[in-house]
């Protein structure tokens, strides 16, 4: 058997599926010629996954144990409820002679493929993690395949910040594309505009030439922060899960809606807020395919609905540059880090 | 309280959501001024829903009871596992003075909004249904809202056939759009090309100017039927849930992939079979949002992925015309009816 650029050779069960579909991956330490082995320093859990774990398990210590059990059982951090994972930061330990990724031993990297398909072994029992933040200090080993994507970490940004940006870097890159496609001065709504992917998407939409740019957030406090950031023309407050409230808060329907809210049930609000002929990009991993498809149909809404693909060529550089060039984005990221580590 | 064109006034729980999100709808017989009341003659269960029910409950009688229980508990035929429903056929009993739908009492219609948001009361205990086909004879009452969509049934086609076409009429209309957008002679793959939405999508792709047109089907028998229909340039056989098998069967990646297979796990095969820069349209209600999003990211695939919106203006007429003008589509539909009622 030879190795596969998609990592088929690491799938233990069920046989024949790709690593992301697999229940369990092999974390055996012998590596294949096109693999890269990484000493893990930190995991960054996907927001929808971390929220679900916290809701299910409550106490931070129980969340910590649950994450550890998932990784030990599955050989990867793949939340079985949300189907999502996150990404990791580490240092390249070993580069196979046939690896096409261009990485060197000692490179400090972040993986840009999901943890749901990345073989991962934890060696420290996550002892340094308190379970109360989606950023997880971790000693362990991860594996990249021939077709995996990783970014070398920039020297000019703190690791936590770079990791948080890279985790959602597909969102601004795809928003850029969609807003440009929609034509000059397209009106844009970002649901969850105060979050990581939301603030980057606002910045991307502005740079792509958006006209009226609306951020929807759940609380007055978050509205204040987004207003201070200057990223949006209008900041409105509503529960994104309440379609009628969303439509009323937004007013005139927009050409492009970007969904960055990490709770389920935001599909119909997005549909109601979007004009006929418009486009919705669903980035939230809490999106329900059937709720979106049947919701649009049920509302007789002629909207184009995109599944937010986390990969767009050049997405890492694009997102890091947006952060560097847009002080408001960095403010929101840093505020969010402070907030997350306080709760 | 006044009625809402979206049917908010019929939502019993949870409060404030749209009918499709609701757990339970009101089927009370007093109708609102913008509603249309329909005497139901037949339900057409969504294929993914019917398959799931059959897998869970086994015997036809148990399937029949399960459907009845869902309708009685929820006030609508909304499969809680798949999140999908289907549509219905009936005769207009009553038209509210403020209804904008243009229907008249006595019109024989099919609803083009999902059963997941259509208030439905069954009066005959589904006594005339054997539980072994997705077409369900039924006496009962359904309600259409101001913004619902319904099509008056054509005189020149049998009801079962018209209903089967209308059930999936969003697929060919959106395929038409996407293939035209992809440019002249775009290569097109239809996963599940022998099914209802699949055969209509093949016909739509051909009419929209597709170049190489490939149908993927699971069995030799179905391949024979699709070959005989003349709808595709190539018919290939593979399990759509096996991504590597799909990619190998299709060969050169295509510009547009249309997913019409009603089983879970077809996302990655679609991604692998689609060229960078290409588009995937997911019509199957068994599609997993996270599997599609993370799968494309994990494979570093720069593909555009669309959630198959069941509503496109003019979709009903478009699909019925395709059926009338394309003998191969009608052959496959009629073969499928025979097959379904045999198993």
Image (cartoon, coloured by chain):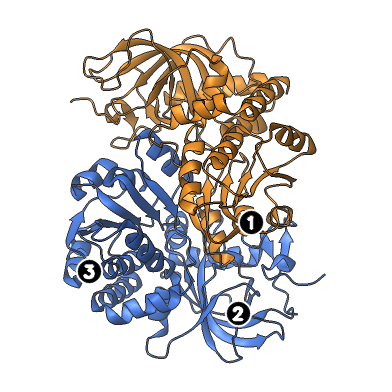
Chain colours: A blue, B orange
Q: Is residue B303 left or right of residue A245?
A: right
**Mark 1 against mark 2, which lies toward the viewer?**
1
User: Whole-percent x and y of residue A210?
Assistant: 25, 63
Of B72 and B259, nearer the camera is: B259
**Residue at x 64% of width, y 15% of height:** B130
Q: Are marks 3 and 1 on the same chain?
A: no
**Neighbour tally class for label 3: few under 14, some 14-19, many 20 plus, Cα within 10 Å:** many
The C terminus of chain B: image quadrant: top right
Q: Is residue B68 left or right of residue B315?
A: right
- Residue, disc 3: A231
**Mark 3 against mark 1, which lies toward the viewer?**
1
Chain of the residue displaying label 3: A
- Above or below — where is A193 with respect to A152? above
Q: CA distance from mark 3 to mark 2?
A: 38 Å
User: Whole-percent x and y of residue B28?
Assistant: 33, 16
**Neighbour tally class for label 1: few under 14, some 14-19, many 20 plus, Cα within 10 Å:** many
**Mark 3 against mark 2, which lies toward the viewer?**
3
Q: Are marks 1 and 2 on the same chain?
A: no
Of B23 and A251, nearer the camera is: A251
Of B190 and A233, nearer the camera is: B190
| Lower position in the chain sequence, tag 3 or tag 2 | 2
- Residue, disc 1: B273
Of A308 and A245, nearer the camera is: A308
**Residue at x 20% of width, y 50% of height:** A250
- Above or below — where is A127 with respect to B123? below
- Residue, disc 2: A140
Label 1 near label 3: C-beta < 8 Å? no
Question: Which SS class for mark 2?
Answer: strand
Would you identify the image quadrant in which residue B140 lies?
top left
- Above or below — where is A232 with respect to B94? below
**Residue at x 47% of width, y 50% of height:** B306
């Amino acid at each position: 058997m030879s190795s596969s650029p998609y990592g088929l050779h690491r799938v233990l069960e069920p046989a024949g599926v790709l690593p992301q579909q697999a229940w369990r991956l092999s974390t055996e330490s012998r590596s294949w010629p096109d693999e890269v082995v990484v000493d893990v320093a930190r995991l960054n859990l996907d927001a929808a996954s971390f929220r679900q774990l916290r809701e299910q398990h409550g106490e931070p210590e129980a969340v910590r144990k649950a994450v550890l059990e998932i990784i030990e059982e599955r050989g990867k951090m793949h939340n079985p409820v949300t189907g999502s994972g996150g990404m990791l930061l580490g240092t390249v330990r070993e580069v196979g002679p046939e690896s096409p990724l261009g990485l060197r031993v000692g490179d400090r990297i972040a993986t840009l493929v999901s943890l749901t398909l990345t073989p991962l072994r934890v060696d420290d029992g996550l002892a340094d993690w308190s379970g109360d933040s989606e950023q997880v200090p971790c000693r362990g080993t991860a594996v990249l395949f021939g077709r995996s994507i990783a970014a070398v970490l920039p020297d000019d940004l703190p690791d936590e910040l770079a990791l948080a940006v890279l985790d959602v870097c597909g969102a601004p890159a795809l928003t850029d594309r969609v807003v440009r496609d929609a034509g000059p001065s397209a009106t844009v709504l970002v649901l969850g505009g105060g979050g990581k992917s939301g603030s980057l998407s606002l910045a991307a939409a502005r740079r792509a030439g958006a006209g009226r740019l609306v951020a929807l957030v759940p609380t007055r406090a978050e509205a204040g922060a987004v207003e201070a950031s200057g990223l949006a023309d209008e900041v409105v407050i509503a529960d994104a899960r309440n379609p009628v409230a969303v439509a009323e808060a937004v007013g005139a329907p927009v050409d492009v809606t970007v969904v960055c809210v990490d709770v389920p049930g935001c599909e119909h609000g997005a549909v109601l807020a979007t004009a006929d002929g418009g486009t919705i990009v669903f980035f939230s991993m809490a999106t329900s395919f059937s709720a979106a498809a049947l919701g649009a149909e049920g509302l007789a809404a002629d909207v184009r609905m995109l599944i937010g693909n986390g990969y767009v060529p050049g997405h890492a550089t694009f997102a890091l540059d947006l952060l560097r060039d847009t002080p408001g984005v960095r403010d929101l990221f840093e505020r969010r880090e402070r907030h997350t580590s306080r709760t």
